[in-house]
Amino acid sequence: MNLHVRAANLGDAEAIDSLLSQCASAYLGRSRGSGEAAERLRRPGTDAALVLDLGTGDLLGFGHSWPSADETKCFARVRPDATGRGVGTVLLTYLETRATTGSISVTQWATDIAGPALLRARGYTETLHQLQMWTPLPAHKQDTPVPAEVREFDPDRDSQGVFAAWCDAFGQQADEHDWWRERRDDPTVHFDPSLWLVSEDGEDITGFCLGRHRDDKVHGTVGYVGDVGVRPQWRGRGLGFALLTRMLERFTSSGLPAAGLDVDAANLTGALRLYAKAGMQPRPNFTVWSKQLAA
């Protein structure tokens, strides 16, 4: 097969959205809404490419990379019926040669069984294994006292406090614009403030649980927890468990059949025990691979 790689632009967004939806359906069991491609192409610093069948003009692969701290992050997807034809190799070669840092990372879904061999052959090694914690709803009922007020997020009142609480809880200094884009402004996340819960002590937001709806091929629409955290000085009081179980109850009251969240398999904060206590069970989700690039 003759493959052609070229830079991607906003005029390609509709075709890219179709490819990403096919990938999500094949590997994740869910659909993706339109708008993701345009969001990726507009990301600051992004360098995006398409792989086309030179004979038919069909889009077979899409990838882009962008600088993040001291590495280049890479996103690459191959149309499911085009795997094994060298599309992934062409994409990674293009993105690696244009990287502006000394290392590059890429994610691979657990259900993409062809990915590991390709990545190992190109010198990548696994640096993170992520699990999805999953539970049917209603989850096992836990009659536990709420150690602080848990209420619905108020966008006008809580936005600054939730971002500060997230940075404190995870010990990170995130770019605020990117943080809100990934959780609220990206149209594909379907932001719903009624599915964000916060806890507070006086005027201080002490913890948060940020939920949303997500499509699943098997279960239809399900609940998904994007972030749950408690600021360090309020830990050890059962607050994280209270926030999570209240979110599961909210998903249940919405008639959703199941709920999930993603977590690092090497998480050492006790999060895995917390999720298991709430009735959630693990299953493989995706792996992050990294590679040092030649100077």
Image (tube, rainbow, N blue to C red):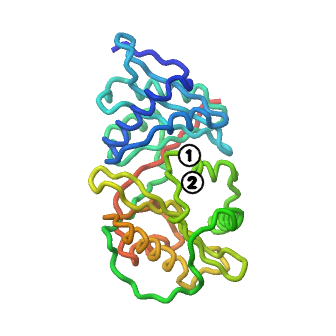
Q: Which mark is residue 263?
A: none
- In the rendered image, which quarter contains the C terminus? top right
- In the rendered image, which quarter contains the N terminus? top left
At label 1, the amino acid type is Asp
Question: Secondary structure under badge 2?
Answer: helix
Could you say which quadrant of the image residue 112 lies in?
top left
Camera-side residue of 51 and 245: 245
Q: Residue 186 carries which label?
A: 1
Q: Which residue lies furthest to the top in this view?
A: 55
Q: Where is residue 9 in the image (x, y as percent from the top left)?
A: 56, 24
Q: In this view, does 211 lie above or below 31?
A: below
At label 2, the amino acid type is Arg
Camera-side residue of 187 and 80: 187
Q: Position of residue 48 (x, y in %)?
A: 56, 28
Q: Where is residue 258 in the image (x, y as percent from the top left)?
A: 33, 64
Q: Residue at x 66, y 34 (%)?
A: 45
Q: How crowded is mark 1: few (under 14 residues within 10 Å), some or many (20 or more)?
A: some
Are the residues at dot 2 and dot 1 in contact (C-beta closer than 8 Å)?
yes
Q: Residue 183 carries which label?
A: 2
Q: Is residue 174 above or below residue 151?
A: above
Camera-side residue of 157 and 293: 157
Distance of mark 2 from mark 1, alpha carbons? 7 Å
Q: Which residue is drawn at 42% across and 18% down?
A: 52
Q: Position of residue 118 (x, y in %)?
A: 39, 34
Question: Secondary structure under badge 1?
Answer: loop
